[in-house]
Amino acid sequence: MELCPLIKNILLLDSEGKRIAVKYYSDDWPTNSAKEAFEKAVFAKTQKTNARTDGVNHVDLLTKVNADAEITMFDNYVVVYKFVQDLHFFVTGGENENEIILAAVLQGFFDAVGLLLRGTVDKKEALENLDLILLCLDEIVDGGIILETDANVIAGKVASHSMDAGASLSEQTITQALATAREHLTRSLLK
Amino acid sequence: MAQPLVKKDDDRDDEVDYSPFLGIEKGAVLQEARVFNDPQLDPRRCSQVITKLLYLLNQGETFTKVEATEVFFAVTKLFQSRDMGLRRMVYVIIKELSPSADEVIIVTSSLMKDMTSKTDMYRANAIRVLCRITDGTLLTQIERYLKQAIVDKNPVVASAALVSGIHLLQTNPEIVKRWSNEVQEAVQSRAALVQFHALALLHQIRQNDRLAVNKLVSSLTRGSVRSPLAQCLLIRYTSQVIRESTNDTQTGDRPFYDFLEGCLRHKAEMVIFEAARAITELNGVTSRELTPAITVLQLFLSSSKPVLRFAAVRTLNKVAMSHPTAVTNCNIDMESLISDQNRSIATLAITTLLKTGNESSVDRLMKQITNFMSDIADEFKIVVVDAIRSLCLKFPLKHRSLMNFLSNILREEGGFEYKKAIVDSIVILIRDIPEAKESGLLHLCEFIEDCEFTYLSTQILHFLGIEGPKTSDPSKYIRYIYNRVHLENATVRAGAVSTLAKFGAMVDGLKPRIFVLLRRCLFDNDDEVRDRATLYLNTLGGDGAVVETDEGVKEFLFGSLDVPLVNLENSLKNYAFDINSVPKDVKTQPLAEKKATSKKPTGLGAPPPGPPSTVDAYEKLLSSIPEFASFGKLFKSSAPVELTEAETEYAVNVVKHIFDGHVVFQYNCRNTIPEQLLENVTVIVDASEAEEFAEVDSKPLRQLPYDSPGQTFVAFEKPEGVSAVGKFSNMLRFIVKEVDPSTGEAEDDGVEDEYQLEDLELVAADYMLKVGVSNFRNAWESMGVDFEHVDEYGLGPRDSLAEAVNAVINLLGMQPCEGTEVIPPNSRSHTCLLSGVYIGNVKVLVRLQFGLDGPKDVAMKLAVRSEDGTVSDAIHEIVASG
């Protein structure tokens, strides 16, 4: 019996349900067409459930952006999702997975992408920084097992290469490095 | 972010559909990958090309073996670059390309160098990549580094090694198990995620050692686990330990329950929920144990986060199935969820409420649901309809409002599946709640006035024909039915004509009026409608005289076709018009109830047509053998039983054909030696352990060439209609001739030889046909108690209730009905319904009641009803001797 929480897949789709970046960690979808069929179905289903709230008025739409993750059951999978602009974030887990764990993974992915794209979270920006998105996926889950859910740590690990790769940093952990950097920044702002 | 990130050039137009990958082509990108070979590497350029390659792979593009190898080799050159960003991309693409073993060697040394690098990021990623692509032999070389990495002071490195360990445990368990000490140390790590990964790995290493898991759980539940994820794991392990430990019901205290309850006060929601869920899933959970879990779930119900609400309502929905009263406290919170924006949550809330609701709240609930129904999708509506049906069966007094609800939603828009679910529900309610019959029938009548689905219309007309005449005022249905004759397509019109005829047959007072209506149908422009009208006018005596309808006509009108359509079709194709000659198939034959008038179908749908059976093929085969033609009609053919091990020289299996007074063994033989030709193949059967059987005939197989199957038969006589059992030992005897492999010709001279086969047993289940009934309760009632035989048996200690149930089902060889062969987990008692036809065409129904008596002992009460007392006794004999 599998006791460790497992992620089945993480999807980042655009406003038409097309792939921007997807990562599958399960053999439940052995072929590309099976994957595409799943994405299509998930997209259609979540569009339908959200169309109502989005369609009402613009204010609703804006609140939606910052709103909490939504959730649905689908073909014996639990899917948590979050939309912003023309980007659709999904995390899928098995039928018996703890929903809140899945939501934590989604939140980590969502926020990390937000940090990496420096606030401009849309399809164009995501595609232009696809390398960052792919690295981000690589840092969140390894073969279905959750590696990290803290968005700051994830983004820190992805972005670490653009920082000074000097020896001093290698002594600290990346989290520490980030914290120090943030501290420096606030101090310089306060002056 | 503290530092600016690498950005690509932004000097492009902001088109709406702009994508940096617009018009990207695999061939071109593969060309671009040549930059990897440049002596002066441009890290940014290379990164971009890798991103493009990854984009292609991500979009579902595949590389051929040659392409993948080429890219892989080019990528390995990039280890020369010291650019960290590029190195990260190299790691990712190596994992995506999943190189073959001989290619892996190329990067091994580079990755091993990175594994021992001073840079944490290199170490962590190199470990992940290397472990992903490596095989066992390489693993022993790097094992030392991995063990070090597990206890690395950098959490990212430690996690990388631990997670890799979890993956490697699947392929190289013996190596990973040697890391136990390091992993144990890592469990104590201060870094949250390291603790989580270490705990997961440690448990997997020890999972087969119950004692060790027990120790692990008891030491950790006392200490403090920092990471919420690790705490969730610990809760899962704890419930597993609880599940496996023998529950001491005497003291009432469950080990580790306090730990689970303590987790309900954890600060992380995922832990609280995990603990609450674990408590609700405990075996035989008491309401005292449930209460604190239900309380936290109730709090989640009013959370602002949809995920929390969903998780809570989904769990409560499950609890409501086994402990409806425990959930009633949440009903008010649940009711407010009916209007939840998230329709999955709303549907779960409604179905939970329908399960827990009491009689007094039904009306209020129905009002709320009515508003809700209009804006959910059909799939949710079907769930609600099913829940309402079970509610109505639970509170029959509330049938009026529930039936009204169903008829209202029946009138609204909806797809076929949804409408069918409603109609099926109404039909079941009519069947089970007598007071609901009249209103239900009228609702159905109204529905067919405006029904776009021909299938549903004809099914309802059929149902009306059976139920309508038995109501207090059958005449009021006639108008609805006759309207169909005017307004519908030919299929529905034909159905309506049949229904009219049934009213005419059953209600003498209506006969003259029915005749008038039927005569009008004689001028219909569809021939099926005209034919039916003519037929019914004649059978009912439509020449004007009002006569009592005789039983034969009723049987003709109401009796069910007791042969499957597939078989009937086949027989008709052979121009065999005698209905008695049509074989009754094993699986699909609906067991005709004794009295047609008491027939009540379960739903509208007829039993689904099964696949054309092999019985047909056997029947054809056997009837082509003149020696067996006199045995009469084939009763049953068993599934093939293997008499040889797989991959032996001669593969033989046997099919047992049961006739009333005979048994024929059909030995299917296959010769798997190309250099041999077998001739005159027979099976010598020793029936000394089957006293009631006498061999009457055998039919040898003249030739058995290599790899082309052949059959030989042996026939036995046995006492007629009796389920004689016995054991037969078999010997394959034949003349073997050598075959020249080059020419394929056999030598002239052969040698006689024998080959021992395994024994064959004829058991009682061989005399039982698996035949399902559509409505067990009705069949049971109409069978009556005349030949009922009830007795109790102790089945002794069993692994599980399910195992005991399956054993009895297999022993009897009967068809489980109404899904009762499935046993809900954790149940301590179960009722299983079986039906079948015993040799001599005797219908048999069995009700098995199982109960756990003590921790493992299973007790069973067996009630058999059949058309023949000796058969009922015989069934008991089977169980008693089995």
Image (tube, coloured by chain):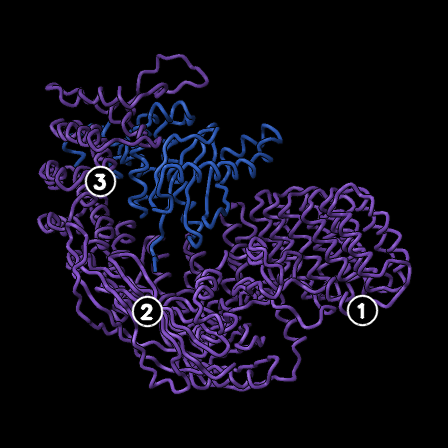
The amino acid marked with disc number 1 is Asp
Q: CA distance from mark 2 to mark 3?
A: 82 Å
x then y, percent, for residue A79: 46, 44
x then y, percent, for residue B868: 60, 82
- Looking at the rendered structure, whether the residues under marks 2 and 1 are on a common chain is answered as yes
- Looking at the rendered structure, whether the residues under marks 2 and 3 are on a common chain is answered as no
The amino acid marked with disc number 2 is Pro
Q: Is residue B711 left or right of residue B854?
A: left
> Which chain is disc 3 placed on?
A
The amino acid marked with disc number 3 is Thr
* Residue B250 seen in the figure: no
Look at mark 2 in the image and give the residue it sits on. B700
At numbered mark 3, what does the secondary structure look like: helix, strand or loop? loop
Between B509 and B73, the one nearer to me in the picture? B509
Look at mark 3 in the image and give the residue it sits on. A173
Look at mark 1 in the image and give the residue it sits on. B550
Chain B tint as drawn: purple
Between B45 and B56, the one nearer to me in the picture? B56
